[in-house]
Amino acid sequence: MKKLLIHNQNTFLADGMIFSNPEQFVFDPDFDVIDVDHYITNQLISGDLKDKLAQAEVVFIKVALTNNYLEYMGIRLAYHLRLTESLGEKINIPIIFVAEESYQFLGLTSQLSEILFTKGIYLMRDTKDDLDKFKKLINEGRIQNLPSLEEFISKIQVPLLRIIRPTIQSQMSGVF
């Protein structure tokens, strides 16, 4: 199975032994990038990440992709991957998050944790034992794609909508 690792030089998986150079994407926005969502979108629409995704059948994403570990930029990237229509069928690719945390800890500390509980999403510890376990699951065909975008959307909430909704409501209250 063709695989892709998205990381920021912060995992043993990046040593070149398991994932060759063409199978890796180093998430490294320039220091002057103000809008990381714009950086992610550009990479998925026309950047190197899009080209590497086109070759992959499964994606491993390190949960922490920046020095601010609790940003969980890998989770944010996964949302972009799932919601970027121009990727076609690649939006359904299996995603294996690589982290030191458990589902419970990520669920408690991330505003974007709903993605962890959708189909086609998996979580592995950043250890050789867990990697071996996931290799076996992949070889057995037990790692599955997201069945449909509609199913994914029905299971998630995007925090931006939580921010916009009260603003709209306060504007509307002055109208009536």
Image (cartoon, rainbow, N blue to C red):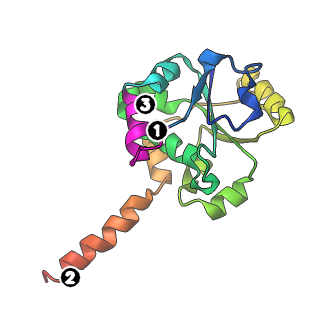
Q: Secondary structure at mark 1?
A: loop
Q: Is residue 102 above or below residue 163?
A: above
Picture quadrant where residue 99 is located: top right
Q: Amino acid under label 3?
A: Gln
Q: Amino acid under label 1?
A: Asp
Q: Are marks 3 and 1 in contact (CB under 8 Å)?
A: no
Residue at x 58%, y 30% (from the top left corner): 26
Residue 118 image offset from top left, x and y in percent: 58, 46
Q: Which residue is mark 2?
A: 173
Question: Which dot, 1 or 2, sits closer to the camera?
Answer: 1
Q: Which residue is mark 3?
A: 43
Q: Amino acid under label 2?
A: Ser
Q: Is residue 58 above or below residue 73?
A: above
Question: 82 left or right of 97?
Answer: left
Q: Secondary structure at mark 3?
A: helix
Residue at x 82%, y 36% (from the top left corner): 130
Q: Could you tell me how far apart the alpha carbons at marks 3 and 2 are, in whole angstroms?
A: 40 Å
Q: Is residue 163 above or below residue 3?
A: below
Of the numbered discs 3 and 2, the one sitting upstream in the chain is: 3
The count of marks equals 3
Q: Could you tell me how far apart the alpha carbons at marks 3 and 1 are, in whole angstroms?
A: 13 Å
Residues drawn in magenta = 29-45
Q: Could you tell me how far apart the alpha carbons at marks 1 and 2 are, in whole angstroms?
A: 42 Å
Q: Which residue is mark 1?
A: 30
